[in-house]
């Protein structure tokens, strides 16, 4: 399982159990504490699950695979699991579209989409699309609620590193002591950095995002996922838009 944010693989785990399959799980070393008490509680609720859940260090003797990883590990997954039914996921990220008409509460909610879990999840917003002449200070005003993220050493080191890199490269950036705003066409941004890009028309932006859909997990904004809800998926909000239960039913 992936371990970039807490319990990121829980939906897959639940789908496997609810579909009547046995779950053979290799937990991520970064996310192995919460799963154990949850498994114990599930077995108390439904004792038969005890025989359906197996935690392992090495995955073997399996019939099908669900795996998530980086773009590099995805290539290894494709090769290693080529002879098995598989649901493989690679790196994606999320974006937000602003119109300039957002309320204060909506901008505060956007801050949650950006900063929760230090921005490490695929549902975290790493790129903003803003209209021409948008006042970026409107965002800094609401971001200060999360200023304590910089007290985390790894986050602070990332902030200092990229601030130095961008300043030496004479990039046009805005920064406030804990977040760097960088004008950049890239969807993915490093921890402590938030990319933004100006757009002219929403129609042309929609076409642009459609071409990038294989790299995007969520789009936040009006007519999309509401601000503040990116990291609050429902059980049927399957990763990459692929219905996990249907995959399991076909095995």
Image: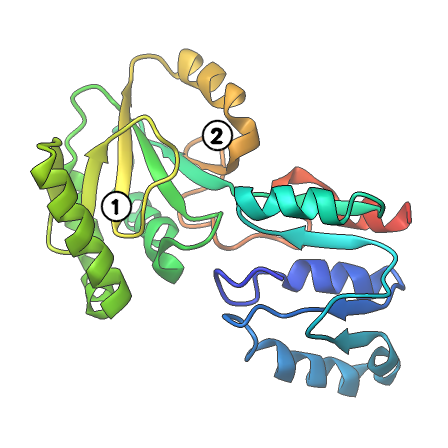
Q: Position of residue 220 (x, y in %)?
A: 43, 38
User: Mark 1 Cα within 10 Å, few/some/many (few <14, many 20+)?
Assistant: many
Residue 146 visible? The answer is no
Q: Residue at x 37, y 53 (%)?
A: 119
Task: Residue 213: name its quadrant.
Answer: top right
Q: Secondary structure at mark 2?
A: loop
Q: Position of residue 191 (x, y in %)?
A: 31, 52
Q: Which residue is mark 1?
A: 193
Q: Quarter holding the N terminus?
A: bottom right
Q: Which residue is mark 2?
A: 223
Task: Residue 8: name its quadrant.
Answer: bottom right
Left or right: 62 in relation to 12: right
Residue 52 visible? The answer is yes
Which residue occupies the foreground of this view, 169 or 198? 169
Q: Position of residue 241 (x, y in %)?
A: 65, 39
Question: Which colour style is shown?
Answer: rainbow
Q: Earlier in the sequence, mark 2 or mark 1?
A: 1
Which residue occupies the foreground of this view, 195 or 96? 195
Q: Residue at x 37, y 58 (%)?
A: 116
Q: Position of residue 134 (x, y in %)?
A: 18, 27
Q: Secondary structure at mark 1?
A: strand
| Vertical relation: 30 (above or below) 139 | below
Task: Residue 100: name its quadrant.
Answer: top left
Which residue occupies the foreground of this view, 208 or 85? 85
| Vertical relation: 198 (above or below) 15 | above
Distance in Å between CA atoms under marks 2 and 1: 26 Å
Q: Residue at x 55, y 80 (%)?
A: 33
């Amino acid at each position: 399982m992936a371990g970039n944010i807490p319990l990121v693989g829980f939906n897959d785990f639940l789908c496997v159990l609810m579909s009547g399959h046995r779950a053979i799980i290799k937990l991520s070393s970064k996310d192995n504490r919460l799963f154990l008490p949850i498994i114990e509680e599930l077995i108390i609720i439904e004792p038969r699950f005890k025989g359906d859940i197996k935690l392992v260090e090495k995955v073997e003797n399996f019939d099908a695979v669900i795996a998530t990883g980086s773009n590099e590990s995805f290539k290894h997954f494709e090769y290693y699991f080529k002879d098995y039914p598989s649901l493989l996921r690679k790196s994606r990220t999320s974006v937000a579209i602003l119109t300039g008409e957002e309320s204060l509460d909506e901008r505060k909610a956007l801050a949650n989409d950006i900063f929760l879990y230090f921005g490490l999840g695929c549902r975290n917003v790493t790129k903003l699309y803003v209209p021409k002449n948008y006042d970026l200070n409107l965002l800094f005003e609401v971001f200060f609620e999360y200023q304590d993220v910089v007290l985390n050493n790894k986050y602070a080191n990332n902030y200092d590193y990229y601030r130095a890199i961008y300043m030496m490269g004479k990039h046009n950036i805005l920064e406030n002591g804990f977040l760097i705003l960088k004008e950049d066409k890239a969807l993915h941004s490093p921890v402590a950095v938030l990319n933004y890009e100006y757009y002219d028309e929403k129609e042309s932006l929609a076409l642009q995002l459609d071409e990038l859909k294989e790299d995007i997990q969520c789009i936040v904004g009006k007519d999309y996922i509401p601000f503040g809800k990116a990291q609050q998926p429902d059980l049927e909000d399957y990763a990459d838009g692929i219905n996990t239960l249907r995959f399991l039913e076909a095995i």
